[in-house]
Image (cartoon, coloured by chain):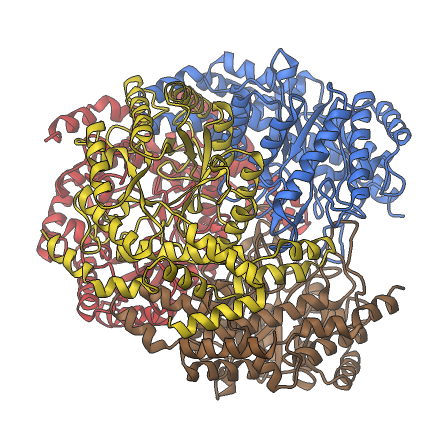
Chain colours: A brown, B red, C yellow, D blue
Amino acid sequence: MTEKQIDLGIQQLELEFGTGYVKKALENIKKFKIEIPSWIFGNFGGGRFGDYMPPAGARTIEEKLDDAAIVHKLMGASDTVAMHMLWDFSRDGMDSDIEIAQHVNKEAKARGLIVGSISPTYFMRGSQRGSLSSPDDKTQKRYIEQTVLSGVIAREIGSDLVTIWIPDGSLYPGQIELRSAQEKTRAALTEIKNRIDKKVNVLIEYKLFEPGTYSTVVSDWGSAFMLAQQLGENFGVLVDLGHHPHGTNVEQIVARLIGSGIRCGFHFNTRYAADDDHSVEPSGEMARIFYELVSGDVLFNSNAKKNWAYMIDQCSARENRIHAIMHSIDSLQISLARASLLDRQVLQQLQNSDEIILANRYFNSALLNADVRPIIAVARQEKNLPVDPFAAFIQSGYQQKIEMERSK
Amino acid sequence: MTEKQIDLGIQQLELEFGTGYVKKALENIKKFKIEIPSWIFGNFGGGRFGDYMPPAGARTIEEKLDDAAIVHKLMGASDTVAMHMLWDFSRDGMDSDIEIAQHVNKEAKARGLIVGSISPTYFMRGSQRGSLSSPDDKTQKRYIEQTVLSGVIAREIGSDLVTIWIPDGSLYPGQIELRSAQEKTRAALTEIKNRIDKKVNVLIEYKLFEPGTYSTVVSDWGSAFMLAQQLGENFGVLVDLGHHPHGTNVEQIVARLIGSGIRCGFHFNTRYAADDDHSVEPSGEMARIFYELVSGDVLFNSNAKKNWAYMIDQCSARENRIHAIMHSIDSLQISLARASLLDRQVLQQLQNSDEIILANRYFNSALLNADVRPIIAVARQEKNLPVDPFAAFIQSGYQQKIEMERSK
Amino acid sequence: MTEKQIDLGIQQLELEFGTGYVKKALENIKKFKIEIPSWIFGNFGGGRFGDYMPPAGARTIEEKLDDAAIVHKLMGASDTVAMHMLWDFSRDGMDSDIEIAQHVNKEAKARGLIVGSISPTYFMRGSQRGSLSSPDDKTQKRYIEQTVLSGVIAREIGSDLVTIWIPDGSLYPGQIELRSAQEKTRAALTEIKNRIDKKVNVLIEYKLFEPGTYSTVVSDWGSAFMLAQQLGENFGVLVDLGHHPHGTNVEQIVARLIGSGIRCGFHFNTRYAADDDHSVEPSGEMARIFYELVSGDVLFNSNAKKNWAYMIDQCSARENRIHAIMHSIDSLQISLARASLLDRQVLQQLQNSDEIILANRYFNSALLNADVRPIIAVARQEKNLPVDPFAAFIQSGYQQKIEMERSK
Amino acid sequence: MTEKQIDLGIQQLELEFGTGYVKKALENIKKFKIEIPSWIFGNFGGGRFGDYMPPAGARTIEEKLDDAAIVHKLMGASDTVAMHMLWDFSRDGMDSDIEIAQHVNKEAKARGLIVGSISPTYFMRGSQRGSLSSPDDKTQKRYIEQTVLSGVIAREIGSDLVTIWIPDGSLYPGQIELRSAQEKTRAALTEIKNRIDKKVNVLIEYKLFEPGTYSTVVSDWGSAFMLAQQLGENFGVLVDLGHHPHGTNVEQIVARLIGSGIRCGFHFNTRYAADDDHSVEPSGEMARIFYELVSGDVLFNSNAKKNWAYMIDQCSARENRIHAIMHSIDSLQISLARASLLDRQVLQQLQNSDEIILANRYFNSALLNADVRPIIAVARQEKNLPVDPFAAFIQSGYQQKIEMERSK
């Protein structure tokens, strides 16, 4: 995008939405920070194609941080990196070690990065009968301890945020008692709550299915909300786009959670089929979600306690991972810019006069029709970042470098 | 089913599940009561086929009660009839009148029937912009008053139960503000709560979509639960089988709601495609739902306050309605009998030893494989009812009689 | 959109996509014709809200044509109007009359409009047991005759196009024999085929469910394709966006049908929940569908026989219908313009080098990110149409006029 | 199940359905053969839980055949074993070897087993850009050759049956051209068809999604049918329960395919969430599918060429695999017995008189309500098999034996 294109684009947006809203959108883009996951960069396959993985997967946490650092250097919006207890802070995949976390923290800082949310890892060796709801007391205990430790790490090293996804469930009717799995989960979380520093926010993620295909203990936002309600103030709900039945109005779930006053978070990604965990694309749905976040004032609230947590959670088993994460960041910026352009008074007038089609058209004018990429470009310029981070990445030679270095 | 068949069947069940469980199932069937809706018998079409309706639709509330009475006479399980404020207690479809309700109550009693749950009617004339969330204050007020009156009627005449389905939503993104629709709904319900007698239980029904296709204010169990939580003890959630996305594990929602301690209710029917509102069929899913209700002790709890409310909600626009409602009652009895046969200790042993397939097989032995119709037959005999109520209905000549009388 | 905005926008698009592609998109928009349905303007309700309908519904076919004429006058893209045999050409809702069709044709011409596709109407009085698959021979015969007549009307008056939607199905397992319903349908269509002029194209529409909720004879594209294959060359498949299970990749169905060489058609509308039949919105999905139509060369093929048929099928029971149909036309133009901008060679290079993310980004640059409204504006200017047809409609006073005239 | 239980049960069934139908069901069960997959017994994990797998996974094809042999010895219904080209007949996971196939054949025969359908393996190393639709000619060629070889093996060693599942698709819009992927697939299949012996039946499997999540070349029955039609007589469609969108009426797809006259096949398993590949449970849906197979005469047709192919395809990553496969066989027998009991004349009379509910009740009397396990028991007795194969398996000590032997 040349200077001319940027200039034409900004003029056009200002003529349509007014300089105030364009300026607001620009400010929002400049302020917007999104946490990225360490695991996206790792050396894992997708289960098919002979466990194919794209070249240059990071072999160590240091290499993952290297990749996160280049992304942040190019796009300037993701200095915080989410960590997984058993992937990033463990020697044996069974227990985590705060000393490793401290080491990772040092490595992150050395690269200008920050350790962000901490995710206990409930789905590794020994969890086939469940984690927090395991009928085996020792197993349940092990996961409780890991979670408590994740709280300590989040407080001492991270950003006071623990996000938990509980993969407990069942494959067949009759395999487990549904109610007791739920009660065990609640009991475990209650112990965790009692032992975790109240300054740590704990977000409970829900997911429709997988690994359990018949039942999942925390399968929808209602079940996560019910738990969060019962546990208390520092517990919230974590929304992930791919974790819903088809046809779900996700922006309305966001609206409801904002309305409830609970402090929540979002795991961004794109889905077509199931829980695809693809790169974010700048779809209408994503723009509508951002409209709720912006108008619900949980994105840049001056009272930081009211802001939700924003993370990307994606797994790119086939595509270039650095491209993939940059694509997501760019798409989120586009979605946010769109959501920032609307004049809510104009919208409300149309709504109040029951002008259904005109309200939808005004809504879509920003959320589907406007080209907001010039705003993103200006934001990058003002932050001394490359306007086209993809071109910059390709030019940098980083990909070739890691492909060579990491090929054994 | 002859005496011989019944006898063989009971023997077989006793050999498989033990006399104790067969007896328990029999007792449960004899105790089980299910409320039926007045509206099933009415003279309405299904929107297609030139608004075709099956012959002999009831033209008045008295005729609806006649039909309900014959069903109860034949099957002995449904002496309670659900009423709709604007269908059954209104002259003009806009306001309800307690005097009509009192008249209906007398008519019901004269037929050995009881007025059951009261449903405010939010989806008639003047509700196109919403009912409890209407931006028009007068409209919202009208629906609040109707709901408060439904509480009075439920207390004075009915069974202390109000069930509400809120059809508010939108068709297009941008048509309404999602968060304010939710807040208005909550505000209206709060006023209702403050004005309704605490002895009245209010159940909030959720529904995935329709009439709103883009958004629905109370679209899932989580949103109904959130409201019920905020409103207080006498509010609960109403589950209807057809109101979920495909692939939803409904028995787990039941388990969760039981676990929450909230007093809820069920609208039984069967669905294949969307919100079909068909007759209940004795499917595996229905048996699993009853397993949760039985094992969760919300069906025959000695503390009546803990029992949920059980209603049929169906709309049979093409099929014989009296057949349809009798089919549902029979299918619910089958499902309950199945759910009553399992020895939970046997099941838990298999679960504890992680015998996944064996647990599923034991579960299915009762829920999918056993033939429990002999238990239903004995229950009918012991209550001096016809063993085959369908044959009895056909023999009674009732259908021909009403077809003649009601054809103008 | 001012001259300045148009000018800035065109410049920007030319800088991004090149003048050639912008010109191509402009030509496409100018050539693009879309058939609109007569029934959208009619005086029907949506089944809820006391059968609410928006003010000023057309009471006669003449009034429907008046509304279609104003839409065409303002937007210049929809001179052809689809007709329904029993809604538009019948006195009694049971049989159609070619003389009425001839009268309608005259009325259409008088308004500068053309009678387009003819739809037999299979779902009115007497069809509750099915139409073409009815077990009642007389009923089946009646629908066959109606269809044959629709072929005559399509040949003599319309555009040689018959579109059929068969609402046959069932509500419960066991209600009908699935295989025989299918065989009866095929037999009826075979008779129709033998009696209809080969110059008439017959498109078979499929629909997931409704009115049948357990089974639908023609429920998916495969079943329509199977029938079309068996019937022969002048039979094709009619795709309607709302007639698929959630999560269906509709653009791929379009690609498959194009690949098969069968001549097909599209019923445009938008869906969120089920078969919503809302106004088209310019979503990513719609742009991708147009990408297949454009790249598959079935939109402006110089061999007119290869072009598919393009129709809007929508039902706007709550919103202003003239707004609604104009919104659809506008959204289709946006989708087409987007699909016309891509340089397939650039795309293929990225595809060939397995640059997954970069290919998606290039694809999205036109389909999701570009603002093509300036192209639509120029097309309107060049056709001497108002750049903003909504403003022009509001200014025209037409809505107030019909609201007054048609309020009895 | 004791003699007494069996006797009571048979009497009861004869009283309800008549001795003729009970006898017919018994004969069907005795004749019914179901192919089982070699891969179910293998040593693979499920992707989660640290790649947990149940104890005693078979490490070699010989051990897989040992497990298949014990299943057949106990249940007498599965002497045929499906093989996968790269799992069972390959040294390196890239190419297959007919000599290995011959060896496997000998090993199978030595255990009283038969090599059944042959599946080319398209989803291993080197397939990440597609198999038959790969843009890389060498890759496409390799898969064509493998498929041709699978035809040779099917003809020389197996049962003249090749089943193919093509995992080609894409993750993002724009990643591939949808139409060209389809055309390449068709071209590759055309070459395969020309080179494969016409006596070999080739079944094309479809699957909604995975590994492709945005697009899948053969995603639904329509796309498999389209290909089969174009390829010719020895090509058919392979139905797998888990490969459909939720809410799909699978028995109707079966009815359509039977109606088309194409020779098809079925991969049995159970699904709740996505493509679960669980053990078959005896659900209402499965009974309805068998009703179509039985009434459509593609199960025991005296003209063997008309019979479909019946296979189990399941993957039991958590549960005991031998239990799991035995559970499936048992459940299929139950489903078949149910479908065999109905008197179609009785059903048709109810259908003809539009007795919707009574038809559904009669249908369900066999498909949902009857207990047919006594029929299965008699069939086992008459074939000198244990009435309770699960008890027999547990008593045999086989599980302990292989757990010991195979633990390294």
Along the viewing direction, whichever of B358 and B224 lies nearer the viewer: B224
Q: Quadrant of the C terminus of chain B?
A: top left
- Residue C367 appears at what percent x and percent y? 53, 59
Q: Is residue C314 left or right of residue A48?
A: left
Q: From what the image shows, is residue A193 above or below residue B94? A: below
Q: Is residue C142 left or right of residue D386?
A: left
Q: From what the image shows, is residue B367 above or below residue A190? A: above
- Residue D114 appears at what percent x and percent y? 79, 23
Q: Is residue A20 left or right of residue B55?
A: right
- Residue A403 appears at what percent x and percent y? 83, 66
- Residue A95 appears at what percent x and percent y? 77, 70
How many marks the image carries: the answer is: 0
Q: Is residue B388 visible?
A: no
Q: Quadrant of the N terminus of chain B?
A: top left
Along the viewing direction, whichever of D38 and B104 lies nearer the viewer: D38
**Extreme residue toward the bottom, this view:** A302
Q: Residue at x 65, y 23 (%)?
A: D232
Along the viewing direction, whichever of D208 and C101 lies nearer the viewer: C101
Q: From what the image shows, is residue C206 above or below residue A243? A: above
Q: Residue at x 57, y 61 (%)?
A: C364
Q: Is residue B355 visible?
A: yes
Along the viewing direction, whichever of B323 and A390 lies nearer the viewer: A390
